[in-house]
């Protein structure tokens, strides 16, 4: 595709926030300035595009944001942007500021919105994978995933201390409505007894058998990791089912919840966000539209958004094999 002349670029964060979004915004804005582009912040994701909450960004806006969790541009889930009328208002607002192109930082939903917007109005857009869920193809890891896994592991380590002291069985729920990436990573990284994810059904009898075997083997503690969108329910539901089979166990449930979305980004997420932020601006200037910039084997790759959002990135079967071997 032939590159359009781009003089003003808008950047927004959308969907659930993720650690490293600020680092990504900073890199996008810094790279924009480097290439003499006027940069605009669109606040609260697509909500701000519709309510015209759009401001020109200066250097001062991105000072000391790289290390901060959350997103200083704020984020939102916008029902109105899902409607053609909402998107038309958003387009009119962009035009009123003379914005020629967009960088959208968010998850699969946010990138779906960017793809639709490009198709309808021809506004050049590049997506950056910003979500703790890691559920986008075209990148080994999404911005925020590594930090979220570290946060989950740190919390589970603490739970293990008390679980071991009291010989208790813990069910720990991690985030991931439709994706088990945090669960499998945090599960392997914290020596979980079992890991339950949305993509795979584990019959309750299997889980119960596994826990019985571990009890016989006199394992010091048992921690089961459950992704919130598990096929048989979340940690609370699974714990209730298991307690019917193993009434002699002292069972506790911990839901880690939104603490997994906060915190200062890890070094990996800072690097990822910084590389992809620069690549977003350079991609737009080279005429790469309707694509997501990702990192595969440490190289920047531009993948059509349509491909990146397709639900074909699944938890590696080999990770399950490893988890099984290590928990036996
Ligand atoms: N099909 C769609 N058409 C238009 N806009 C969409 C569509 N899907 C999502 N969006 C927009 O993107 C926003 C964010 O999407 P969603 O809530 O799925 O989060 P996400 O970007 O996947 O992030 P995460 O899953 O990490 O929280 C939605 O609130 C909506 O404004
Ligand atoms: O904060 P909200 O809007 O309840 O969204 C929670 C969802 O967002 C995510 O944290 C991803 O951002 C999912 O893992 C979780 O299911
Ligand atoms: Mg999503």
Image: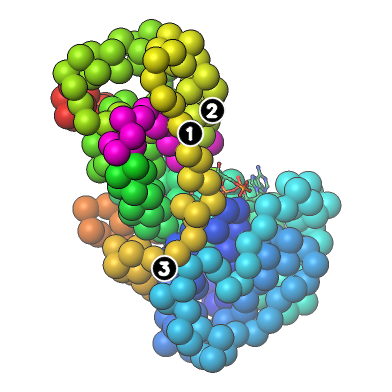
Q: Where does label 2 land, which residue?
A: 236
The label nearer to you, 1 versus 3, is 1
Per the image, the residue denoted by label 3 is 264
Taking 250 as reference, is 193 left or right?
Answer: left
Label 3 crowd (10 A; few <14 / some 14-19 / many >=20): many
Does the closest atom of ligand 2 sit within 8 Å of the Cβ of label 3?
no
Disc tally is 3
Question: Which residue occupies 55% across, 68% down?
Answer: 71
Residue 317 position, x and y percent, is: 26, 26
Residue 37 relative to residue 283: left or right:
right
Q: Dividing the picture into quarters, in which one does residue 144 lie? A: bottom left
Which is more N-terminal, label 2 or label 1? 2
Dividing the picture into quadrants, the one containing residue 161 is top left
**Residue 290: horizontal and vertical position, in percent?**
52, 55
Residue numbers of the magenta segment: 163-181
- Label 1, on which residue? 253
The answer to whether residue 95 of the structure is visible from this angle is no
Q: Is residue 67 above or below residue 283?
A: below
Q: Residues within 10 Å of mark 2 (few under 14, many from 20)?
A: some
> How far apart are the alpha carbons under marks 1 and 2?
6 Å
Q: Residue at x 68, y 65 (%)?
A: 44
Residue occupying image coordinates x 66% and y 71%: 42
Which secondary structure, mark 2? helix
Find out whether residue 173 is within the magenta segment.
yes
Q: Is residue 328 visible?
A: yes
> Do the residues bearing badges 1 and 2 touch, measured as CB atoms within 8 Å?
yes
Vertical side of 77 occupied by 250: above or below: above
Quadrant (top left/top right/bottom left/bottom right) for the C terminus? top left
Callout 1 secondary element: strand
Disc 3 on helix, strand or loop?
A: loop
Mark 1 crowd level (few <14, some 14–19, many ≥20, 10 Å Cα): some
């Amino acid at each position: 595709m032939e590159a359009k002349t781009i003089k003003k670029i808008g950047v927004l964060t959308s969907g659930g926030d993720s650690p490293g979004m600020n680092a990504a915004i900073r890199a996008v804005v810094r790279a924009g300035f480097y290439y003499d582009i006027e940069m605009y912040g669109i606040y609260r994701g697509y909500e701000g595009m519709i309510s015209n909450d759009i401001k020109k960004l200066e250097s001062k806006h991105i000072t000391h944001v790289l290390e901060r969790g959350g997103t200083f541009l704020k984020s939102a889930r916008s029902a109105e942007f899902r409607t053609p009328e909402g998107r038309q208002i958003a387009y009119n607002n962009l035009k009123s500021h003379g914005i020629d192109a967009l960088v959208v930082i968010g998850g699969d939903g946010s990138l779906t919105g960017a793809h639709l917007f490009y198709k309808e109005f021809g506004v050049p857009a590049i997506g950056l994978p910003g979500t703790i869920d890691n559920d986008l193809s075209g990148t080994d890891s999404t911005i925020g995933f590594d930090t979220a896994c570290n946060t989950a592991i740190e919390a589970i380590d603490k739970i293990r201390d008390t679980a071991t002291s009291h010989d208790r069985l813990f069910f720990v729920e991690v985030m991931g409505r439709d994706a088990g990436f945090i669960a499998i990573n945090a599960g392997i990284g914290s020596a979980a007894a079992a890991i339950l994810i949305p993509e795979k059904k584990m019959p309750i009898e299997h889980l119960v058998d596994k826990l019985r075997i571990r009890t016989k083997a006199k394992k010091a503690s048992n921690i089961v990791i459950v992704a919130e969108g598990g096929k048989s329910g979340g940690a609370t539901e699974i714990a209730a089912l298991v307690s019917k089979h193993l009434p002699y166990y002292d069972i506790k449930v911990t839901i880690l919840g939104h603490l997994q979305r906060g915190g200062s980004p890890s070094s990996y997420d800072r690097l990822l966000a910084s590389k992809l932020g620069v690549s977003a601006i350079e991609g737009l200037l080279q005429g790469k539209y309707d694509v997501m910039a990702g990192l595969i084997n440490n190289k920047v790759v531009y993948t059509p958004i349509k491909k990146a959002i397709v639900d074909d990135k699944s938890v590696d079967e080999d990770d399950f094999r490893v988890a099984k071997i290590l928990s036996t």
